Image: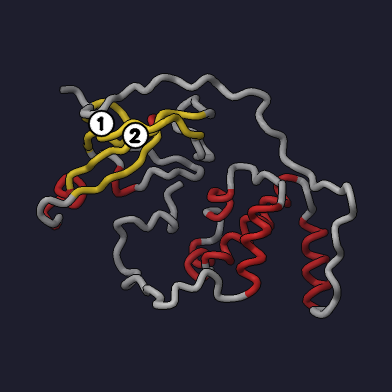
Amino acid sequence: MDGVHDMGGMHGFGPLEIEEDGALFHGEWEGRVLGMARLTPVRIPGGMRNAIEQLDPAEYLRSSYYEKWLHARIEGCIAAGAITREEFDATLAYYSEHPEAEIPQAQSGEKPVAAERPAATPPVPSPTFAVGDRVRARQVHPRGHTRLPRYIRGKVGEVVQVYRPQGFQDAEPLDDTVGPQPVYAVRFAGGEVWGESAEPNSCVLMDMWESYLERVPA
């Protein structure tokens, strides 16, 4: 998906604010959201990142890190059928009017509804590329979530390491592969990525699934 979330290489957002204390959470509710994301056994259709990227661009920029997580978990539970939109709206309205009301505890043996998992995982292919191969990041514009940044698409780099296969996590696959794929560390020269504005001897190292890449003829 090409959206406001893909901020790599973009200008106009100001400097990064680095906190001196490095606090993990800025409020008790943030820790609860992390716990919800880790412990609620409801698989989000399309993945959590895809759910986050469905936010309105203005809302995405306004929202904090854990606000985005909370949105993804709520929408994921609704999409998976664990709760309905009406149930969520009614519960939200109730606790907004009664903030001191006790939260009900799960009953013994009660299990949330989980999205169905694929019946079988496709076999893992052998790596197509090897260390030293020149590859180009594919120039594509997926509709769903992708971890292929816009600023690297169409750029030529060199494979510097081959990793073990890992699960392909894009919501809209770039090819017919939906299971694990070989993953590569690819080195892109700074001049290839940033042109004349690149710093001398700079480079970008990026871990990339195989379907993100195409071979560059020798």
Please give left or right for residue 1 compared with residue 184 in the image.
right
Q: Describe the element under mark 1 as helix, strand or loop.
A: strand
Residue at the spot 42% in from the left edge and 44% down from the top edge: 147
Residue positioned most to the right = 108
Residue 12 on image: x %, y %? 31, 69
* Residue 3 can be seen, yes or no: yes
**115 displayed left or right of 185:** right
Horizontal side of residue 203 vs 36, given as left or right? left
Q: Is residue 175 above or below residue 12?
A: above
The residues bearing labels 1 and 2 have C-alpha atoms spaced at a distance of: 11 Å
Indicate whether 27 appears above or below 109. Answer: below
Q: According to the image, label 1 marks what residue?
A: 135
Q: At 17% across and 44% down in the image, what residue appears?
A: 189
Single out the mark in the foreground, 1 or 2. 2
Residue 211 visible within the image: no
**Where's residue 155, x and y in %?**
24, 40
Q: Residue furthest front?
A: 21
Q: Is residue 157 above or below residue 17?
A: above
N-terminal label among 1 and 2? 1
Q: Quadrant of residue 92?
A: bottom right
SS of the residue under disc 2: strand
Disc 1 and disc 2 in contact, CB within 8 angstroms: yes
Q: Which residue is mark 2?
A: 184
What is the quadrant of residue 98 in the picture?
bottom right
Residue 45: quadrant of the picture:
top right
Residue 131 point in image, percent of width and height: 25, 28
> In which quadrant will I find the C terminus?
top left
